[in-house]
Amino acid sequence: PPTSRVSLTVNGTRRTATVDNRTSLLDLLREHFGLTGAKKGCNAGACGACTVLVDGHRVNSCLTLAVRLEGAEVTTIEGLAEGDRLHPLQQAFIDQDAFQCGYCTPGQIVSGVGCIKEGHTGSPEEIREWMSGNICRCGCYVKIVRAVEQTAG
Ligand code: FES
């Protein structure tokens, strides 16, 4: 199959790979770059477990073609903490006990960071609506919304 070379910035580091043109950003991150924080749930855009930021905006990385991202800036869950200091939303998830099994958590947190950046935190209902693409099978929604609220201040 046809391949392409793609260069992009991931969590502040320039990365390059040669990939099958059909490779998703999720597979690029997980299989080429060893960044397994973004999870493969449905692989079809329905669960949000694979959420990352591309140029500051939330995307489902399973639906995003890697070869389209030449020059893009990608942020994954691995890029949120600064050294030993957790991102405030990571800390808020711990404070609010906003997970059980944890599978959806990286996607929830990255999506929450996007939600805060985009300013959709006016009320719990607004947060819930803007986080609705992130499914939690353990049903931690109330605490997830509280964690986003805590961080948005
Ligand atoms: Fe991408 Fe479910 S794995 S939305």
Image (tube, helix red, strand yellow):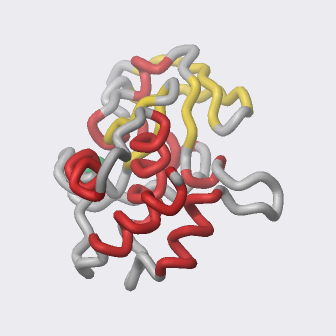
Is residue 138 visible in the rendered structure shown here? yes
Foreground pick, 33 / 133: 133
Q: Residue furthest right?
A: 83
Residue 13 vertical position relative to residue 99 in the rendered view, above or below:
above
Is residue 43 visible in the rendered structure shown here? no
| Percent coordinates x, y for residue 46 in the rendering | 17, 51
Residue at (82%, 56%) from the top-left corner?
83
| Percent coordinates x, y for residue 103 in the rendering | 39, 72
Foreground pick, 76 / 128: 128
Residue at (39%, 84%) from the top-left corner?
100
Residue at (53%, 54%) from the top-left corner?
153
| Percent coordinates x, y for residue 125 in the rendering | 22, 55
Which quadrant is home to the N terminus?
Answer: top left
Foreground pick, 9 / 144: 144
Q: Is residue 114 left or right of residue 127?
A: right
Marker count (numbered):
0
* Residue 137, image quadrant: bottom left
| Percent coordinates x, y for residue 52 in the rendering | 45, 43
Q: Is residue 49 left or right of residue 28?
A: left
Q: Is residue 151 left or right of residue 20?
A: right
Residue at (54%, 20%) from the top-left corner?
72
Residue 53 vertical position relative to residue 81 in the rendered view, above or below:
above
